[in-house]
């Protein structure tokens, strides 16, 4: 249906994932199987669901996968807030990630609405 590699939202999600992986490398190893694991799964889910939805046969299916990607954005945002509160990530990193997530959420939401 769509070439996911040409979608701006997919590219933004890939960049966000790279940034999250870079930042989580700084978190103490004892959190590897806790918050780091959760954050990495959530951030990988975003571009993965965009790509999977793009390969589906109907706009409705694509919209459903974009909804899942949005859910993962909100999950990641919550994990960033918690990581900041626990001082696992700096305020600067948290603000940068939150800004990227918010922009991506808006773009996914707008794109999803065009598929009606």
Image (cartoon, rainbow, N blue to C red):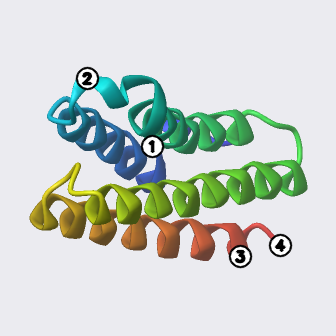
- Residue receiving disc 1: 6
Q: CA distance from mark 2 to mark 1?
A: 36 Å
Callout 3: helix, strand or loop? helix
Q: Earlier in the sequence, mark 3 or mark 1?
A: 1
Q: CA distance from mark 3 to mark 2?
A: 41 Å
Q: Residue at x 87, y 39 (%)?
A: 57
Q: CA distance from mark 3 to mark 1?
A: 18 Å
- Residue receiving disc 3: 113
Tag of residue 116:
4
User: Would residue 19 appear left or right of 76 to someone viewing this image?
Assistant: left
- Quarter of the image with the C terminus is bottom right
Look at the picture and state if 93 lies above or below 41: below
Q: Residues within 10 Å of mark 4 (few under 14, many from 20)?
A: few
Q: Earlier in the sequence, mark 2 or mark 1?
A: 1
- Residue receiving disc 2: 29
Q: Earlier in the sequence, mark 2 or mark 4?
A: 2
Closer-to-camera residue (37/62) = 37
Q: CA distance from mark 2 to mark 4?
A: 45 Å
Closer-to-camera residue (68/109) = 68
Q: Which image quadrant is residue 60 in? A: bottom right
Q: Which image quadrant is residue 74 in? A: bottom right
């Amino acid at each position: 249906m769509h070439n996911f590699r040409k979608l701006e939202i997919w590219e933004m999600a890939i960049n966000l994932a790279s940034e999250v992986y870079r930042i989580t490398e700084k978190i103490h190893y004892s959190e590897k199987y806790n918050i780091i694991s959760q954050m990495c799964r959530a951030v990988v889910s975003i571009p993965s669901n965009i790509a999977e939805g793009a390969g589906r046969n109907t706009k409705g299916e694509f919209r459903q996968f974009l909804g899942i990607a949005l859910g993962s954005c909100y999950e990641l945002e919550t994990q960033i807030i918690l990581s900041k509160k626990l001082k696992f990530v700096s305020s600067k990193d948290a603000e940068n990630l939150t800004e990227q997530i918010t922009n991506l959420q808006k773009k996914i939401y707008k794109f999803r609405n065009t598929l009606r």
